[in-house]
Amino acid sequence: MRIPGLDTDFQLIAAPLPIHFARVAPPAWSALALAVAGGQGQIVSLWASDHGAAGKTVSAAYQTTAGLVVAELALGTAATYPDIAGHFPAAIRMQRAARDLVGVSAAGTGDQRPWLRHGSWPADYLPLAAGNTGAESFGQGNDEYEFVRVAGDGVHEIPVGPVHAGIIEPGHFRFSVVGEKVLRLEERLGYTHKGIERRFTGLDLAAGARLAGRVSGDSTVAYAWGYAMAAESLAGIQIPERAGWLRAVLLERERIANHLGDIGALGNDASFGFALTQFSLLREDWQRVSQAVFGHRLLMDQVVPGGVARDLDQAAIATQLEQIRVVRDMVARLRRIFDEHAGMQDRFVTTGQVGQELALRLGLTGFALRASGIARDLRSDFQFAPYRQVDFKCMTRTNGDVGARVNQRFDEIAESLRLLLRLLRGLPPGPIAAPLAANGGGRGFGWVEGWRGPVMVALETGNDGAIERCHCHDPSWQNWPVLEHAIIGNIVADFPLINKSFNLSYSGQDL
């Protein structure tokens, strides 16, 4: 495949979705970013690697109408590459993280602050450098972070976090306000950095699958499927048809569980405790059935390279079909209550609004993008199995506010329940896994529409079959910066609502 304006052939990778890869020179690196931006494509991920004697590389993955396009740029001794943040603002933090971890820098970028380091290791130590193991330890260094200051009469700052009142992951939010009105929000994340990318190095594919499923616990199926797809594309195998259908069952169950929990929490943040109670009950029952039929409440370790770990018998199918009927009816009743609750609608409507133009410019993705009126979803955009066979319908809203994101979640629950009915009733016969033969060195990619948005996994193995590099990308990288814009002009008291309407991952981004 060729991108218009580039003299580069992109190789089609064996995968269920169209994924293309090429090594490029610096001019093509910049030209590709320009071409993708001009075609209203999005950056999916940017990451760097240290291959030892072979040198360092930086890679970027883009979503285009032709599929996922991945470019790798070899770097010289200066370890610099052309900045692409001018085309894709979401790349700014990715470039900062690449500098912290591998020591490669985007030439000409404006923001040189560290992103992940937090003073936990010296500036000249690179956790993903080829000569380091990740086991090195250092004393806590200076952790002064230069937040952007807002000047003016009556402006003051409200620091929130990283430790919060609820049992949630840590993150720091610095509000600049006049009275109650928010002028600016700046986030500082990285507190849950655990060295996952270094931990992948040296693992075999089976051990890597377990680790991938633990990158972000609420998206374990999406990450496990993305990793398995990458391993399968690397090995050049196709999974059995029944395995693909069972993966879709698992993914839609994960999607529904998260939307149920978040809608209840949003109702609670609007002082409607009844919603939290009812949706918590629904989610708990949903997860108990997941435990009963798949052996794990969160569905961990069910997707494995080559297929799935567990089949469904007729009793397990019947249990799920009955639960779908109950949940579908109950969610419909609760939705009517939400729609008719004037106080809650007053808190939701026009709050935290993200219009189409802003969403596209900043690279918003997933259900939040669809709530701003942009119909993008890997399940429909590229019609891969089994979503092609079950006639998946991409749902959208237009207002881009908290209310639209709540309604988008209701719509996606209804569509996922409909999909589950078709998937469970139409499960094809056959095996649930195929052997994954060792294939020596190579690379593969996985790309899956998780409940937040697209999850991507890039996987490289050495000649011995062990993992040399595995990069997992969460859609929260794109959406956290949009949250900073969504709060502008709103009052501080509405931040919990706006934040929960996105409900982004800390662990998935911090790695």
Image (cartoon, rainbow, N blue to C red):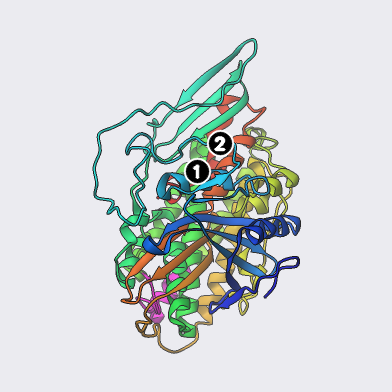
Element type where label 1 sits in the image? helix
- Residue 457 image offset from top left, x and y in percent: 47, 64
> In screen coordinates, is 264 left or right of 401?
left
Question: Which residues are the magenta region?
Answer: 302-323
Where is residue 146 drawn, in percent x and y?
49, 26
> Mark 2 packing: few (<14 Cα in 10 Å), some, or many (20+)?
few
Where residue 199 appears, x then y in whole percent? Answer: 31, 57
Q: CA distance from mark 1 to mark 2?
A: 8 Å
Image height of 433 relative to 493, above or below: below
Residue 170 spot, x, y in % from top left = 39, 37
Q: Which residue is mark 2?
A: 111
Q: In the rendered structure, are the residues bearing label 1 and label 2 in contact, judged by CB atoms less than 8 Å apart?
A: yes
Q: Which mark is residue 394?
A: none
Instruction: Using the rendered view, name the quadrant where residue 355 is placed.
Output: top right
Which label belongs to residue 96?
1
> Callout 1: 10 Å neighbours few (<14), some, many (20+)?
many
